Image: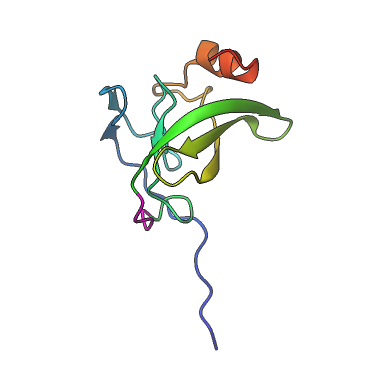
């Protein structure tokens, strides 16, 4: 019998943003996967929180899409391999919420 791979691993550690250099604190309730200041991320996950991706390229925020259930969804493109990833924004977080002005600018395609 094959074992089922877990699709989500909570990995809520703080980190130093590889793009802007700011210190990012843990969210406290889920895996923080992007910088709340510049919205950039790293291509480190196969599934959320697993840190199993070997690419390790920078994920550039290319646009934001409003979602009725999730709020805002940030669309990232890996600058190393070109992969596209979708990440839920944390604009309502109590600790270091995502920059709402930057989210709105990306929604309007103004970056």
Instruction: Depth check: give the residue in front, 20 or 49.
Output: 20
In this view, the residue farthest toward the right is 68
Where is residue 42? Give x, y as percent. 37, 40
> The N terminus is located in which quarter?
bottom right
Where is residue 14? Give x, y as percent. 29, 35
Residue located 37% across and 58% down the image: 52
Where is residue 5? Give x, y as percent. 50, 69
Query: Please, what is the dominant secondary structure of the magenta stretch?
Result: loop
Report which quarter residue 19 is drawn in.
top left
The image's colour scheme reads rainbow
* Membership of 39 in magenta stretch: no
In this view, the residue farthest toward the bottom is 1
In magenta, the rendered stretch is 51-55
| Image vertical order of residue 106 relative to residue 33, above or below | above
Where is residue 37? Give x, y as percent. 39, 19
Report which quarter residue 50 is drawn in.
bottom left
Say left or right for 110 vs 98: right
Instruction: Depth check: give the residue in front, 110 or 27.
Output: 110
| Image vertical order of residue 35 relative to residue 46, above or below | above
Instruction: Depth check: give the residue in front, 106 or 49.
Output: 106
Residue located 38% across and 55% down the image: 53
Report which quarter residue 70 is drawn in.
top right
Residue located 33% across and 47% down the image: 56
| Image vertical order of residue 11 relative to residue 23, above or below | below
| Image vertical order of residue 56 relative to residue 66, above or below | below
Residue located 42% across and 43% down the image: 31
Say left or right for 86 vs 21: right
Could you tell me how many numbered marks the image carries? 0
């Amino acid at each position: 019998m094959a074992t089922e791979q877990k699709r989500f691993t909570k990995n809520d550690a703080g980190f130093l943003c590889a793009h802007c250099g700011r210190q990012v604190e843990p969210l406290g309730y889920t895996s923080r996967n992007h910088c709340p200041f510049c919205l950039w991320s790293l291509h480190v996950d196969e599934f959320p929180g697993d840190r199993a991706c070997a690419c390790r390229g920078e994920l550039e925020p290319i646009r934001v899409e409003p979602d009725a259930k999730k709020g805002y969804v940030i669309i990232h493109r890996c600058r190393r391999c070109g992969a596209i990833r979708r990440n839920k924004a944390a604009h309502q977080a109590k600790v270091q919420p995502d920059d709402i002005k930057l989210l709105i600018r990306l929604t309007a395609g103004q970056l």
